[in-house]
Image (tube, rainbow, N blue to C red):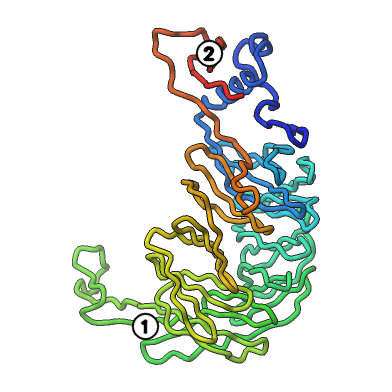
């Protein structure tokens, strides 16, 4: 069901009614009360909807996917916070949402398949996945969607239809490049794919040979501007002897196994290497410990989150420690700290905020910050000109059941001052 609304409409007052019990009684209620009957019906299953994915369109609109334990919805939110439409989706859960460059197609992905919505909220196509395990989706600048399943790269157009795509052997999940294409690892090579699906180059990763109890391999990678790449090199050090984990007797070892055997343990350390387009090394960082939390800019500046509100800025010129306070939280390139959000970049940018208790959820490509009021399940956009704008409200409000001294027959709706009672549930009226 699609609900079109006028541009400046109050979304909640104009939602269609779904009366509880006796439909004739529901038809006599006002618009706000019809909404509350509708939410009370849904609240029988205790369904609280939470935003799980969001993407901005080319004209500043925002598409938000909501999910409860049993159902999902997709909504289009205009820049002023009004709701253009909302539509139920066929998925019980949603893993990603992508928007075509022109905003005409929206692709929702779950572990079951893809469903394509048009910009008007109507379902255009649906594709069921075979019984495979698919990676997260990655979109290039042309709107093509890439997935990897069983070592093969698969591609889908903006309408969710499969398109022919070359796949290198042992393909791993792709990463978007600054030029609008994608890059993926295939064995010890990084394969660059241009927008539209053509292979445009390869870079071979030269691993160091093992040195006794020390071995090396390449981990994550980040494509940079100009064809360069930042690559993580992981060093594994084998440890034996009394400092290693000791198997104890009685742990179910088979015949002939020594119960006091010392098994080897491994310590990992990561460093970063910046490689030119031809694979030559530009520079190498210090050791960053095990599985460091990193954000890398397209220009190659590295922000290393050390925890405790400290972030180290690394580049070819050296390092700098940025301190945001012990209560700071980091989400990608966004740092939430006292009274502000800092967007890490070249250079970092501080965005002052009014006092609020909202949870930082992310940002849109046009620069708006996104926050969630977790208690009310409401999503807010923030920018310096308009402040906080409530984008959507799928919190289904209800209160505790009334005492047994005020029973109502099943399906009975009774209006009182400030609230209505539906099937024994008191629901406040919100005009």
- Residue at the disc numbered 2: 417
**Circle 2 SS class:** loop
Residue nearer the viewer, 82 or 210: 82
Residue 120, image quadrant: top right
Disc 1 on helix, strand or loop? strand
Q: Position of residue 361 (x, y in %)?
A: 54, 52
Which residue is under mark 1? 237
Residue 187 drawn at (x, y percent): 60, 79
Q: Which mark is residue 1?
A: none
Depicted 295 relative to depicted 373: above or below:
below
> Can you give x and y, in whole percent of width and height, for residue 219 in the image?
52, 76
Q: Is residue 94 visible?
A: no
Q: Indicate whether 25 appears above or below 389.
A: above
Quadrant of the image containing the N terminus: top right
Camera-side residue: 416 or 382? 382
Residue 79 seen in the current view = yes
Assess whether mark 2 and mark 1 are in contact (beta carbons under 8 angstroms): no
Question: Could you classify mark 2 by the number of other residues whose Cα lies within 10 Å: few (under 14), some (14-19), or many (20 or more)?
Answer: few
Q: For marks 1 and 2, give the CA distance.
A: 71 Å
Quarter holding the C terminus? top right
Residue 109 point in image, percent of width and height: 65, 51
Tag in front: 1 or 2: 2
* Mark 1 burial class by Cα count in 10 Å: few <14, some 14-19, many 20+: some
Q: Left or right: 243 with respect to 67?
A: left
Q: Residue at x 65, y 51 (%)?
A: 385
**Quadrant housing residue 164:** bottom right
- Quarter holding residue 246: bottom left
Left-right relation of 141 to 276 = right
Q: Closer to the N terminus: mark 1 or mark 2?
A: 1
Q: Is residue 65 left or right of residue 243?
A: right
**Numbered label tally:** 2
């Amino acid at each position: 069901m699609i609900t079109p609304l006028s541009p400046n409409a109050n979304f909640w007052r104009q939602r269609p009614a779904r009366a509880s019990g006796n439909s004739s009684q529901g038809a006599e209620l006002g618009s706000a009360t019809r909404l509350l009957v509708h939410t009370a019906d849904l609240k029988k299953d205790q369904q609280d909807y939470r935003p799980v994915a969001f993407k901005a369109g080319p004209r500043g609109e925002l598409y938000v996917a909501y999910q409860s334990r049993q159902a999902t919805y997709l909504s289009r939110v205009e820049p002023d916070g009004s709701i253009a439409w909302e539509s139920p989706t066929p998925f019980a859960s949603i893993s990603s949402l992508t928007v075509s460059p022109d905003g005409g197609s929206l692709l929702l992905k779950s572990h079951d398949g893809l469903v394509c919505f048009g910009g008007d909220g109507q379902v255009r196509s649906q594709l069921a996945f075979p019984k495979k395990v698919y990676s997260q989706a990655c979109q290039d600048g042309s709107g093509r969607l890439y997935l990897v399943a069983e070592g093969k790269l698969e591609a889908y157009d903006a309408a969710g239809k499969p398109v022919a795509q070359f796949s290198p052997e042992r393909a791993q999940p792709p990463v978007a490049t600054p030029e609008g294409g994608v890059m993926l690892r295939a064995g010890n090579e990084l394969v660059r794919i241009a927008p539209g699906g053509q292979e445009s180059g390869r870079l071979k990763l030269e691993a160091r040979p093992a040195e006794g109890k020390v071995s090396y391999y390449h981990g994550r990678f980040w494509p940079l501007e100009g064809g360069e790449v930042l690559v993580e090199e992981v060093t594994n050090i084998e440890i034996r002897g009394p400092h290693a984990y000791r198997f104890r007797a009685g742990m179910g070892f088979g015949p002939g196994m020594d119960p006091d055997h010392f098994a080897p343990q491994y310590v990992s350390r990561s460093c970063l290497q910046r490689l030119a387009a031809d694979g030559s090394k530009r520079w190498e960082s210090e050791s960053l410990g095990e599985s460091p939390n990193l954000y890398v800019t397209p220009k190659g500046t590295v922000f290393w989150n050390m925890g405790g509100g400290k972030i180290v800025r690394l580049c070819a010129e050296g390092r700098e420690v940025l301190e945001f306070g012990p209560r700071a939280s980091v989400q990608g390139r966004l740092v939430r700290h006292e009274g502000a959000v800092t967007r890490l970049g070249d250079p970092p940018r501080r965005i002052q905020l009014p006092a609020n208790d909202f949870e930082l959820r992310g940002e849109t490509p046009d620069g708006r910050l996104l926050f969630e009021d977790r208690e009310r399940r409401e999503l807010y956009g923030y920018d310096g000109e308009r402040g906080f704008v409530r984008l959507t409200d799928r919190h289904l409000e209800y209160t505790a059941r009334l005492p047994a001294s005020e029973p109502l027959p099943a399906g009975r709706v009774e209006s009182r001052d400030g609230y209505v009672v539906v099937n024994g549930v008191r629901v406040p009226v919100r005009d």
